[in-house]
Each structure stands twice: as C-alpha cells, then as structure tokens.
Image (tube, rainbow, N blue to C red):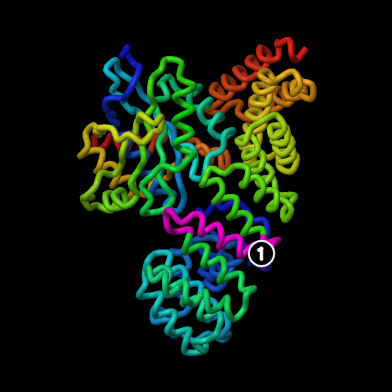
Amino acid sequence: PHTHPPHKNYTMGPDEDLDTLVAKRDHINVLRYIRCHQLREPALVLEHGKALVGNNLNKSLSDETVKLASLEQMCLAALDVQDHDLADRCLDEISKSVPKDAGRFRRLLGRCLESAGATDDAMKIYDDLVEDNPANVYALKRKYCILRAQPGKEPEAMEALNAALEQNPSDTSSWNEMARIRLEMGDYKGAAYALEEVLLGSPLDASVHCRLAEVYATVGGLNNLKLARKHMAQSLELDDSPSNRRALFGLVAVASTYIEQASKASKKEAEDADPEVAKEILKYGGEKLIKMYKGTKLFAAVQAVVDEKVEYSEKALDVPELK
Amino acid sequence: MTANEGKTSSVVISPEAFVGMLLHSATHGTTVVHGVLLGSISKDCVVTVDEAIPICHEEPTKPLIDTALSLVQAASESKVVGWYTSPERLQDQQPGPAALRIVSSLAAANSSGDEPTLIVLHNESMSQLLRGFDPATPVLKALGKDFGQQWLNPLKVSITEQGGATSAAQDAYKQKIPIADLVDHFEGSSTQWPRNMPLNKCVEKHC
C-alpha cells in the first residue's frame, strides 16, 4: 500500500488515489498521478510506462505529447534504478520526434550524463543552457545538484544554489534546499533564515512551522526559544491531528528548554523572560500528549517523559531571579 | 584511570543492533540516518551495543534529539552508550557535524564519565554486503574520543555471531522488512518503534 503524506501543492492530478489507479491498470493516470504529486516511485513508473508504450517503447499513442511525457518520465525513472540501457533507449525514442538541440531534450540528456558519472559533460550542457538563457533556473539547479553530490564541495554547491536563487528569489524549493544544505553543514542560523523564506511561500504549512521552530531551538538563546515556542504553537493550530505529533512533542521540548535557559539567565535577561507562560505551554502540551497516547504501547514512556519535564520545570522556576 | 572513565578500549555489537543499523540505513538510501545505541559499558571500558534504536532519516535538530533520548530512556532499562549515523552520499565516509555534536553532548551529559561511542556506517560496503557480496572494507566503524576532544579515534570493533548477523541482514533486506524510526512513528503512528518485532524475529532465525 502507498501511504504518502498528502502533497500540499499539486494541481491537476487524477481524482482517484494511486492504489486505485494501479489496481485499475490505468497506466496513463498512474504516471500522471506520480508526476503531479512529485513522488519518487521508479519501479511503478517503469512498470506502467512499459505497459503503456511497450517493452520496445514504440507503441504509438493517440496523443504524441502524452507519449513523449511518458518517455521522459520513464527515462528519469530508469536513471533512478541505474538502468542506463533503458534510459538511452528512451532518449533514442524521444529523439525520433524531437530535435536534439531542443532545450527539454538537452536537459534530459544532461540528467542521463549526470547519472552515468559524466559530470563534466553534463556541466557543459547546463553551462550552455545558462548561456542561452541566464534565467534557466532548471539548469542552475542541476549544476547545484552535481556539486552537492560530491563530498567536500559544499562551498561551490552553496554558490551554485545562490546563483539559482538570484534568478528566482521566491523559489520555495530552492530555499528548502538551502535549508537542507545549511542543516547538513551545521549552520543552524543559516537554515533558520532559509526556512523563514520557505515560510513566506507557504505560511499555512504546519510542517514548515514545526521545522523552523526546531531549528530556532537548536540555535538556542532565550529569544530564539521564544520564537520556537511561537512556531510550534502555530504548527499545532494549523494541524492538531495525530500526524502532527512531532509538533506536540516539539512544543513540550522547546518550552522545557526555554525554562532551563531562563533559570540560568542573567538578571537582565530574566526581566524579559516569561517562564510562567512556558510552564503553562509545557503542561498544555503534556496533557495533550498523554491523552493522545492513552491505551497505546508507548503510554507509560510518554507519561514518564511529560512528568519528568513538568517536575523539572517546577524546580527550575523556583529560582530567586525569576520570582 | 578509574573504572568506567577514560578511553573506550573496544566496541562489541550485537546481531540485533548490527541488523537494525544496516536496515535503517538501507531503507533510506537517499538521506542521512541517525539513531541511538543502547547497551552497557564494562569496567575495562568495553562498550557492548545491545540495541540500535532508529531515530530519523533527516538532519536532526535539538528538540528532536531531546525527545528521542527522553522517550528511549523512558521506554528502556538499558543505558545510552552512543549514537550511530549513516552519511547521505554513497562515497561519504565521515560523520557530519550533527553526529559529532550529539555524541559530544552525550558525553557531557554523562555523570558517570563514561565515554559514548559513535558508529558510522560505510555505505558502499554495506550495499555490497546486503546484496550478498563480501565487502572488501568493513561495513561500519566505531569512533571514540581522541586527544583533540573530537570523536574521530577509530576503535577496535567486533560483531557478535558475525556470520549469522550478516545472513540476517541479507534476509531482512531481501524481505524488505519495514523499518520505522521515531519520525515515521510521529507521522504514521507505527507500532514497531522502538522495538521492531519482525526484524528481531528475523535475527533470531539466523543467530
């Protein structure tokens, strides 16, 4: 069974879910669904793609553009499972109807070269595409991907990603990627900055609020922990279902850390601190967790964790600076 | 040197922990994975890793780790003896800054002065092993604290019942036994966290 979290921004996908489409052997719509939801399912793509265009890829379809789109999708899926032979055959079949200097064809060729390890040749194609059109964000992103795949090339990769962002400063997926690479490098401040940009593009996405909160809490300091509290609370307001329990645990964790920091703060910092509020947040989150886990295997563990944190916060707040 | 203080002499990994780490990493071939190690530390500083509890398949943040450690310690009697990670890129063999920070803070939080160990998986070797081949280089390495206060000192490591552990890993991989880490549990309330019954059964069969 395919249990994917619902993709929040897709458009024009088929109405039915993937399992139904697969069971119905509705090949065209299986491929469409996977494309629209940006899922990574190479095995499915290849199975249904081959059923659609034949093992020799030469079955003709009533709609030529559907066939070309399917071949392109199959080519990328073949690269994903390292079947370079099939990828080459897809390229050959596509080139029967498409001129080899077409931008989209060159992009696909670039991907094939990347996958085969011919990164210099792939770079050349992307450099050419950027020269033809400096705003070719796709090519700029592929350049970034080539660098990112090589250990030790983080600074160059960062530069390439910045180049893509310069052309398209509101591209959420690029900011998302920036956040990822910053996190990988341990640059939590940079990751927070990038996630704030992601948030601008998706202000109602509960998971972005949760991630941003976690990153602020990792940077640390009372101000950041307060921001962390705020974003965790916002995440829960947007999604208080059990599938967002990460934010519920997160709320308890950041409130607890806030109290810990406040209890160690200097007199001046303690003036602006509101640890009593944090304590209430902690209790609120804890109660919701206990309710959520009642009757489940982890109930005892969750209760123990909540009790420990609440007890700690009582002790920590019993400090002269905070009275 | 007093008992249980100072450098780890060697690391012994149980079959369950070995299979658990490999399968967690293999399940998430395109991202980094992280998890916590449970076990015991002897008086002569041998770290025995009994269990490897998978935590996440993304870069971890402080609240996630705090929650993970609290839950794991509340759900288990065993002691936290270290952390494991598997790098994102195939050829990458070093732990990232997050893993190094985590194991360092585990040491700082440790009132007994015990030294936690950091296990780093070797993706290329692991991939060969799981597909039935005999890898030329070890599938993982264990790191202890070095004189620069970093966890980059390679330690002697052994796997208990290595033959059985290897077959169990290959079998589990072939069967595609689902591995749920803490983040999976958060998102889908999987019941196979922290302990994975189907995986443990598979290990029992081979060891």
Is residue B184 part of the magenta span, yes or no? no
Q: Residue sitting at 38 percent across and 20 percent down? A: B114
Q: Is residue A68 visible?
A: yes
Q: Position of residue B53 (x, y in %)?
A: 43, 33
Q: Is residue B196 above or below residue A33?
A: above
Q: Position of residue A173 (x, y in %)?
A: 62, 59
Q: Which residue is mark 1?
A: A166
- Horizontal side of A174 relative to B54 (left or right) equals right
* Quadrant of res B150: top left
Q: Position of residue B78 (x, y in %)?
A: 40, 21
Quarter containing the N terminus of chain B: top left
User: How many circles with numbers are drawn on the protein?
Assistant: 1
Q: Residue furthest front?
A: B148
Looking at the image, which is closer to me, A322 or B198?
A322
Q: Is residue B28 above or below residue B77?
A: below
Q: Residue sitting at 62 percent across and 36 percent down? A: A219
The chain that hosts pointer 1 is A
Q: Is residue A23 visible?
A: no
Is residue A158 part of the magenta span, yes or no? yes
Q: Main secondary structure of the magenta part?
A: helix
Q: Is residue B105 above or below residue A244?
A: above
Quarter containing the C terminus of chain B: top left
Badge 1 density bin: few <14, some 14–19, many ≥20, Cα 10 Å: few
Q: Secondary structure at mark 1?
A: helix
Q: Residue sitting at 50 percent across and 53 percent down? A: A1
Q: Position of residue A68 (x, y in %)?
A: 53, 81
Q: Is residue A118 above or below residue A262?
A: below
- Horizontal side of A160 relative to B85 (left or right) equals right
Numbered range of the magenta stretch: A148-171
Residue type, numbered disc 1: Glu
